[in-house]
Amino acid sequence: MRGVTVIKKLNAKTHKRLLTAAFVLLNIVVIAWTARSEFSGDNARLQDLEVRWALLLPALLCFALAIGAGTAKLVLIMNRTTGRSNWAVALRTVLVGRYYDNITPGAVGGQPFQIYYLTKHGYSAAESAAIPLAAFMSMQLAFILLAVVMFLGWGGFIMSDTIHVTAWIGLLFYAFFPIVILLSVIFPRAVAWGTEWVFNLLHRLKLVKDKDAAVARARGHINEYSGCIRGLLKRKRLCVQILLLSLVYQAAMHLIPYFVLLAFGGELDGLSCVVTALAINSSIAFIPTPGNAGAAEGSFYLVFSQLTSGSVFWAMLFWRFFNYYAWIILGWVAYGTMYLDKKPEAKDA
């Protein structure tokens, strides 16, 4: 019997290692495919270009500021909701969350892993769900707020009519889920009725097979998020603080293409670049490819198109590094070091 137990344990370890290896291989394939689809073609050699390398330093600082704001926000939420926090855990939660967002279609992989990771570090199931959800909702609201202010204030002067309309349509799609969650807090019965009506319609159109199961899943997600929002609304000061940190994150990330553009000889002003970047991101937010691959590259050509043909490739590559590949690399590092922490026993909800 003891030999059988040992064999089972060895088989379990082997199975786990094979799954890990397969997962790493899948990540490599995804990243290689993304890089090939975005950056193929004939381009000038980097050493032949006159690049103002010093201007890439502000881009790097913006990226670091975004990481710092995201980490500080998680620490703040942890402190206010549980009374305890850990900067290392918060940083790894941010990095690994963004890593999984960037390798899964539709950016749906980050939060489940963040919840799993937090439960392994002593947070209860309820706390582990509430912390990433609060961070996610504040990030969504910050993007919507920043985009609305920029589009209303300067969008009509900076963007063409086509881009302006597309940006607003994309923002409506982007804002749909947060609006539903906020309405579920204020009008829970109306949202429950609306959810059932929508899935009834989809069922009649043969787009949903099991209507009851789909409604149950949708209500479960809505109730989970709305419960998190209700908890946040009771802490108004915390709401303001995490929203401000989310605005810092969004502003920093949308300033990166401006500094990359300047480094490669572009002359677009910062405000125009930020408004255009917001418009593009609102339009491609729900493209169902890892890291919005393909759509992001093609859309951001609007920002970098004023550069010479040889410079466009490298400018896009450096921008994409800060926006996508750096998160992948840091996610690998965070994933490889997270088990160095001593983990307390996870608590029940």
Image (cartoon, rainbow, N blue to C red):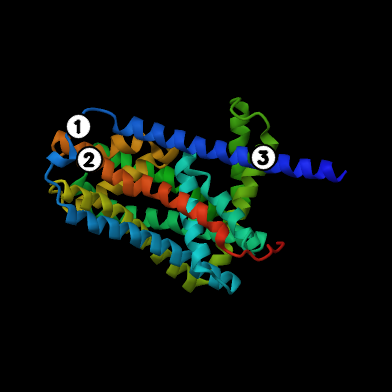
- Secondary structure, mark 1, is loop
Q: Is residue 288 visible?
A: no
Q: Residue at x 24, y 59 (%)?
A: 58
Q: Which mark is residue 338?
A: none
- Relative placement, left or right, of 318 versus 10 is left
Contact (CB < 8 A) between labels 1 and 2?
A: yes
What crowding class fits label 2: few (fewer than 14 Cα within 10 Å), some (14-19), or many (20 or more)?
many
Measure how far apart labels 1 and 2 are at the Cα level.
Answer: 8 Å
- Secondary structure, mark 2, is helix
Q: Residue at x 33, y 56 (%)?
A: 63
In the image shown, does 31 or 5 lie closer to the viewer? 5
Question: Residue lying furthest top in this view?
Answer: 206
Q: Which residue is mark 2?
A: 314
Q: Which residue is mark 1?
A: 43
In the image shown, does 331 or 108 lie closer to the viewer? 331
Measure how far apart labels 1 and 3 are at the Cα level.
Answer: 45 Å
Point out residue 302 in the picture as x, y percentages from the top left corner.
23, 39
In the image shown, does 256 or 244 lie closer to the viewer? 256
Point out residue 303 in the picture as x, y percentages from the top left corner.
22, 42
Q: Residue at x 25, y 49 (%)?
A: 257
- Label located before the other in sequence (1 or 2): 1
Contact (CB < 8 A) between labels 1 and 3?
A: no
Q: Residue at x 40, y 58 (%)?
A: 142
- Label located before the other in sequence (2 or 3): 3
Badge 1 amino acid = Asn
Quadrant where the image shows the N terminus: top right
Q: Which mark is residue 14?
A: 3
- Relative placement, left or right, of 310 versus 89 is left
